Amino acid sequence: MYQKLEKLLDAQRVEALTRELVSVKSVNGTSGEVAIAAKVESILRSFPFFQQHPEWVWTQELVNDRLGRKNVFAFIKKDEAAKTIIYHSHMDTVGIEDFGALKEAALDSDKLTEYFKKYSEDPDIQKDACSGDWLFGRGALDMKSGDAVNLTNLLYYSEHPQEMAGNLLFMGNCVEENDHSGAIAALDELEKLKKQYHLSYEVAINTDFISPKYEGDQQKYIYYGAAGKALTCFYIKGIETHVGNTYAGIDSTLIASRINLLLNNNPEFVEDIPDEEVLPSSCLMLRDQKDFYNVQTAKTTHMYFNTFTYKRPVYEILQHLKVAVEHDCHELVKEMIAKQAAYLKKLSFPAVKDERQIRVYTFAEYLDYLKQEGVKVEELVHTFWSEHQEADKREIGFALLDYLDKQINDNTAKVILFLAPPFCPHNSVAQDSHVYQKLKTALAAYEQEEAFKMKQFFPYLSDSSYLAIDETDAEIDQLTKNFPLVKEIYPLPYDKMRLLNIPAVDIGVFGKGAHTWKERVYKPYSFEFLPKLIREFTTKMWEK
């Protein structure tokens, strides 16, 4: 590969590498993730520096991973230097089903460009395709162009070692698009390297994508921190009934619908952080648990939300949601009672005593309730786990609650809030830190060429979440109490994150349409300008 890159300029190198990486189908959760790791490793091993020092390129296979997925590392060591800059990016992509009839061309930028040149249904993408300034394809934006920028800069420094005043570590992670298990596993490698070579991790530079915020927006957003994410889950049990006696029960899908209307995209439940992109919760799954047709109302319904976190601890967010849901469920019961009363009155039937209610718990509160009722919770959880270790990480919490609820066999409608994987901690860089100040200085050096806006929290979720953590031990302890089987299914190394405490910034490639079939990266900024900007910041971070 190096022979193809040797005489090319930065922009040409980045484009050549992006095309090479996009051509590898590396959909998350498939063997393609193994193939892309092998491709990245082979590219690195083609660099003359690593041919002379093959030991400085290596892979880390994920433990007990059914596909044998790997992280890829490369290290350029400066003699006697401790200061180390990390270039990190992920190698997997989302699927290609959304390309529809174009699925066979999803990894071929040239074919997609020709298609979109004639695509009059979307004048913006047609204009972009005709300009020649955009590169299309799955992963072109998210984030193989970011991988290519990091590889290009690593190659640049290997060719210009006199410009290095510290060390460079490249880290390509797998499994970013769902559980982030690549980045989590990489913490072991980062800790080992730090101890072995007495490294000081000054900053981790992520090149994950940035996009316009509105039509015509040309600002380039630089982030000095990462938003977090909690998967907030709702186990909903109603009171089943025959549809011929529908007022007698409580339909679990009705409760779920109320919760969805209450929380989904509701700005009332977000943090107030001026000038930041603070996003509301959005529903990622809502499903009743009937597995065949009958005329009984649905007894249980499962739902979960993507809930962003910024500064507020997760356990506080969960408690806030619980209070709101509890109030709304109380209102729902009042409405149901009133509707039944009106129905009975219309038929001249006598009124009935209606004592229906919906109890709302957090997971920790529900376990306490079960214990008070004499249920041996710890024994039951142990038995359940021994029989369900192969269950999906997002489904196992619902299954556990269903299992526990059947032990008490009450007839009370209930909502139980809990957490499930993945959990992405939030973290940010303080404005009085040297990282922030040097980033600001690096951007100022290029402000005549580009319009930058610095923001605190990268909004799209990233592996940077696992390099540091802002929540305290006490706050994490409260979180884990509401995370069923957390030690078994998602044992995050909080101590390691806190000990490494690597400041992370995102200086990303620029484009449009991430996670859609219209995904594309803007070449002039991402391929030509961005590598220089990152090297400017890298140099400043090596300075005293």
Image (tube, helix red, strand yellow):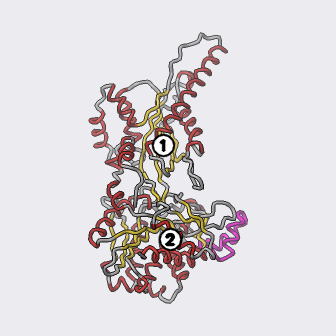
Q: Out of 530 and 274, give the one closest to the viewer.
A: 274
Say which of marks 2 and 1 sits in front. 1
Please say whether residue 290 is visible from this viewpoint.
Answer: no
Quarter holding the N terminus is: bottom left
Please tell me in which quadrant of the rendered image residue 39 appears: bottom left
Q: Is residue 113 magenta?
A: yes
Residue hosting label 2: 146
| Residue at the image position 47 percent from the left and 44 percent from the top | 232
Which class describes the residues within 10 Å of circle 1: few (<14), some (14-19), or many (20+)?
some
Q: Magenta residues?
A: 111-135
Q: Circle 1 sits on which residue?
A: 317
Q: Quadrant of the C terminus?
A: bottom left
Name the residue located 36 percent from the left edge and 35 percent from the top edge. Answer: 403
Q: Earlier in the sequence, mark 2 or mark 1?
A: 2
For mark 1, give the secondary structure.
helix
**Cα distance in 3D space between marks 2 and 1:** 33 Å
Disc 2 residue type (three-letter): Gly
Q: Position of residue 167 (x, y in %)?
A: 37, 76
Instruction: Give percent across and percent down for residue 531.
Output: 52, 77
367 or 342: which is nearer to us?
367
Q: From what the image shows, is residue 536 above or below residue 426?
A: below
